[in-house]
Amino acid sequence: MAFEPPRRLVRALGETAPDGDDWLAELPEVAERAVAQRELAVERVQVPGGRSSLVVLVRTAEGAPAVLKLAPRRARPESERAALVHWGGLGAVQVREERAEEGVLVLERLHPDVSVRSLPEAKALLEAAGTLRRLWVEPPDSHPFETVAERTGRQAEAMRAGAAADAEVAPLVDAALAVRAELLAEPPERRLLHGTFRQSKVLAGDRMPWLAVGPDPVVGESAFDLARLVRDRVEDLIAQPSGASTTRRRIKRLAESLEVDQERLRGWTLFRAVESGVRARRVGREQDAELLLEFAGWL
């Protein structure tokens, strides 16, 4: 079978490797080898798929449904594996293979075309929040994960560069960096976090109704993880005349339901929205940038 990467993946990897990408060129050979070594039967490549990996629906030699996931090193697949093993299937997809091969994961098969995002908004938020709560556990000793301070520190440098080149975003960047400094001064807890959680990262399963996939794990406070969920369906929020007030109510509701400090959630929501907006503008996704920066202005 020809392992053609979906256009969404090619476009996204082009944003993170604008000078070219050896991984994409090598992907067909890597995929063929991974399939042959494991005696997998390929059903299809998942389309549109993710923005950082190739997802292939397969069956094992015993006929069990599974997923073969292939990702470049910069997507931190070994960090993903370590988090999934630590969660042990509680709230997240299970790893189906004990052997560890860099950039190759064999995972439990969920229902890839059915995410929480398919539910009505209120129900989707409720189910997503319940899934996220299960993931917030103590990290393992001597863990390999980035901390929130480390990840946002790298992001802050890129944000400063963006503000220097674009005076329009400078006030929002200044506000986001200021709130980051305040939040990191006294973090209330230290948990293993999903890192990139949103409604589309929660898929229907057989073992449990909903399970999280695709973590980019990080260690820090719960509000950082929840912040990305606040802006889910941002295009719908922006289209509403009451979008700003709806966002404030969403922050309050999510903070109360998951016992997270409301102001800390608002602060991390601001930082993450501005960071995403500046990054979208940097790579030419102007429509996304405008939505995210308008949303950030409400906070």
Image (cartoon, rainbow, N blue to C red):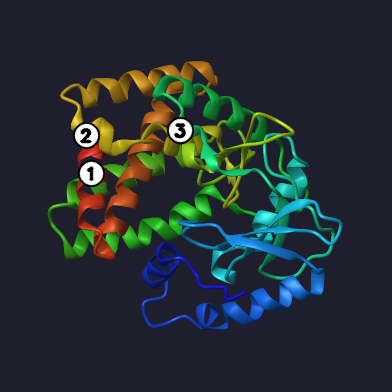
On-image quarter of the N terminus:
bottom right
Residue 200's label in the rendered image is none
- N-terminal-most mark, 1 or 3: 3
Q: Amino acid at mark 1?
A: Leu
Identity of the residue drawn at 57% across and 82% down: 26
Return the residue at label 2: 238
Q: To which quarter of the image does residue 221 belong?
A: top right
What residue is pinned by disc 1? Answer: 291
The x, y position of residue 95, in whole percent, is 76, 51
Disc 3: which residue: 118
- Badge 1 vs badge 2, beta-carbon distance below 8 Å: yes
Q: CA distance from mark 1 to mark 2?
A: 7 Å
Is 157 above or below relative to 90?
below
- Residue 61 higher or lower than 290, as above or below: below
Please tell me how many numbered marks the rendered image carries. 3
Which mark sits nearer the N-terminus, 2 or 3?
A: 3
Residue farthest along the left direction in this orientation: 168
Q: Quadrant of residue 284?
A: bottom left
Please tell me whether mark 2 sits on a helix, a strand or a loop.
helix
* Element class at badge 1: helix
Q: Amino acid at mark 2?
A: Ile
Q: Position of residue 51 (x, y in %)?
A: 46, 59
- Image quadrant in which the C terminus is located: top left
Q: Nearer the viewer, residue 163 or 15?
A: 15
Q: Amino acid at mark 3?
A: Ser
